[in-house]
Amino acid sequence: MSIRHGLLALLDQGPRYGYQLRSEFEARTGATWPLNVGQVYTTLGRLERDGLVEPSGEDDEGHVFYAITETGRAEVRSWFGTPVRRDNPPRDELAIKLAMAVTVPGVDVREVVQAQRRHSVRALQDYTRLKARALAAEQSGDRPEGDSSGADADLAWLLVLEQLIFQTEAEVRWLDHCESRLARQRPGPAAPEAPAAPEQPGRTVRRRGARSGRA
């Protein structure tokens, strides 16, 4: 997730200081990826080093404002216009965990899969409830007339939330697939054969009696 470009996109709308950037970033993404102020200022320092932002004065409380440069604006336009690369995917902890689990002796891989599925299903339910609330707030239209910034923030949060829903749904389907593949390639131990029923004494007497009767 590009904190660098997210902050540049906010600064493209006007100068801001660190706390403002953190608050606006979290508001637009529904605090899905919370930032700390130290992370924001570290990123601003790197952006200034690269010539993408520059200090732009202070307020009465000593907050240092940062403004985007023309080079920074070009960087933002390039970011928006370039697809997110999928040929070098980020590391996925769950995929790595399952890859390790199937190669490490003594790990119950099925339990790893089932525990993750339970967690993912609960997360999916939470996301779905959040979406229902967000949609209800959007439909209520409880905003001053002409206030488009609030509507845009709601739309941004809904887009992020729906991405989380789709991603988690796909994860649950993948876990189902993993469990099916494990069942095919690592079948569980065969059920033990039932022991033969002991011969009942009454039947033995009848057999013996039958033999003596024919003798």
Image (cartoon, rainbow, N blue to C red):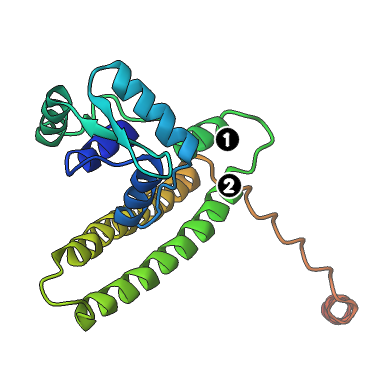
Q: Is residue 41 above or below residue 145?
A: above
What kind of element bears circle 2? Answer: helix
Residue identifier under label 2: 112
Q: Are marks 1 and 2 in contact (CB under 8 Å)?
A: yes
Q: Nearer the viewer, residue 58 or 22?
A: 58
Real-space Cα distance between discs 1 and 2?
8 Å
Quarter of the image for residue 208 reads bottom right
Q: Where is residue 162 shown, x and y percent of the image?
A: 27, 59
Q: Is residue 170 above or below residue 122?
A: above
Q: Where is residue 53 shown, x and y percent of the image?
A: 25, 26
Left or right: residue 45 versus residue 187 is left
Amino acid on which the number 2 mark rests in the picture: Val
Question: Which label belongs to residue 153?
Answer: none
Q: Nearer the viewer, residue 196 or 75?
A: 75
At horizontal 12% and vertical 77% (from top left) the residue drawn is 145
Question: Which label belongs to residue 101?
Answer: 1
Amino acid on which the number 1 mark rests in the picture: Ala
Left or right: residue 45 versus residue 198 is left
